[in-house]
Image (tube, rainbow, N blue to C red):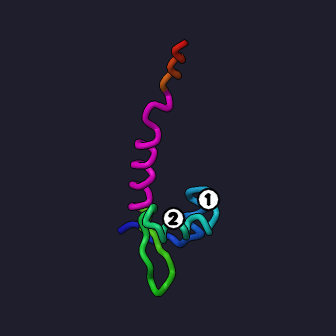
Amino acid sequence: MSEILTVREVAALLKINEKTAYKLAAKGEIPGFKVGGSWRFDSGEIDSWIRRESAKHGKGDDAEPKEKKQ
């Protein structure tokens, strides 16, 4: 079983503000769930989400910039 993380721990892991972590969780943009009104995050799901987001946004980042047509 994966470790369960708090908003503070997820914010630190993602290097974002806690308010931002709350907003992303509430919008469903990061995987989380509420327990008694408090957000919690499965560390395995967060790790998977990070890999998916990295792959999605990382495609082409290492490629040489294309020359502009003149």
User: Is residue 26 among what the camera can see?
Assistant: yes
Residue receiving disc 1: 16
Residue drawn at x 59%, y 69% is 8
Kindly report the secondary structure that dominates the magenta region of the rendered protein. helix
Please check the rendered image and state whether residue 59 is part of the magenta-colored stretch, yes or no.
yes
Residue 51 is situated, as x and y percent measured from the top left of the image, at 42, 48
Residue 24 image label: 2
Under mark 2, the amino acid is Leu
Does residue 43 lie above or below 55 as drawn?
Answer: below
How many C-alpha atoms fall within 10 Å of the one at disc 1: few (<14), some, or many (≥20)? few
Rendered location of residue 57, percent (x, y): 46, 42
Q: Secondary structure at mark 1?
A: loop
Identify the residue at the far bottom of this view.
36
Residue range of the region highlighted in magenta in the rendering? 44-62
Q: Nearer the viewer, residue 57 or 70?
A: 70
Q: Is residue 3 visible?
A: no
Residue type highlighted by circle 1: Ile
